[in-house]
Image: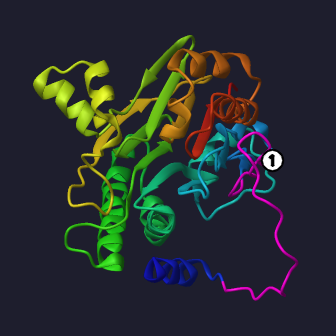
Amino acid sequence: MGRIADMWKKATGEVDVVRPAAAAPPPPATADDRPRRPAMFTSGNFALGATSDDQRRRLESFGLSHVGKVREGNEDHFVIASLQRSLEVRQTNLEDRAVLDPLCGPKAYLYAVADGVGGLDGGRLASSITIQTIVEYLSETVGSYHAVTGGQEHAFLDPLGKAVHRAHDKLRSTFGLSQGGPSTTLTIALVVWPEAFVVHVGDSRAYHLRGETLKRLTRDQTMGAFLMDEYKMTEKQVEQQGFNNVLSSAVGAQDMTPAVSAMKLEQGDHLVLCTDGLTKHVSEHQIAEVLQRTPNAEAGCRELVDMALEGGGKDNVTVVVASALRW
């Protein structure tokens, strides 16, 4: 516990705070009058690709992470980022501004969520290191993206896969445990318009909504899913045995097998990335209904988190919503 806490402080820059002696603490709150915990970590609202020319906007997104109503701390982390080109056109009198679009604006949009496993300090550190490593690796290699032209979008898959493996190696070396120490789920969506690439490890999920149809883009990497596939056990059977809570693959664990998929987005589509703190309380039908009804990514994200809390908030809950704008 002490070693992991020291690692967390080193990674985040936290320092111990010496507090003055205080009066005797009040009696502990009961289950009924326990104060509500505040949300941990910040949310972000990004209209990625936006410039003074609104026609160049492709996606808007919003992310939110909450500790929930039961857990003492938040082991989830998320990130929303864009991979930028170096040229920004401020003004021009060209009749066709679109001819400059391939040289300007974000080349790709990155969304990722991670749910740490291994106790509060260990899980929190594992998911934090993983998200940081993914962003750092992609920022180091962003220069190579400038050469990617239309029709070559799949070139992004190689650096994305390498980023996941670097995060895995970083966790293994950080904790130095041959049998596996703290680990994390990881679900990434990288959008190079109109292509969307999803890389997935563990049981955090990615969804795609088009019209009224919601499709899950990932399959949970749990012992429960394995037993259902290989031994034809029912969902009720694996749930009763608790196998749905046992990961068969995780970043930093002994077994780490990323699953990769790709699809094309259209105007009006929505992507959702979430940890299992959402899906424990909110059904896929409810997710689809919220995305169809809410006016933007932020509203949809906030409502989904609120629904998870109203449903019990038994786990940390993290949601990222990205919406393809109509133009």
Residue 154 in the image: above or below residue 162? above
Q: Is residue 19 magenta?
A: yes
Taking the image as shown, residue 1 lies to the left or right of residue 82, namely left
Quadrant containing the N terminus is bottom left
Q: Residues within 10 Å of mark 1 (few under 14, many from 20)?
A: few
Residue 285 in the image: above or below residue 120? above
Q: Where is residue 149 in the image (x, y as percent from the top left)?
A: 43, 48
Q: How is the image coloured?
A: rainbow
Taking the image as shown, residue 164 lies to the left or right of residue 311, namely left
Q: Position of residue 218 (x, y in %)?
A: 36, 33
Tell me the amino acid under the disc marked 1: Asn
Q: Is the magenta stretch mostly helix, strand or loop?
A: loop
Taking the image as shown, residue 292 lies to the left or right of residue 8, namely right
**Secondary structure category for the residue under label 1:** loop
Residue at horizontal 34 percent and vertical 45 percent from the top: 202
Q: Does the magenta stretch include residue 38?
A: yes
Residue at horizontal 24 percent and vertical 46 percent from the top: 248
Q: Decide which of 129, 19 is in the foreground and name it.
A: 19
Q: On the image, numbered disc 1 is attached to which residue?
A: 93
Q: Give the range drawn in magenta.
A: 15-42
Residue 96 visible in the snapshot: no
Q: Decide which of 53, 199 is in the foreground and name it.
A: 199
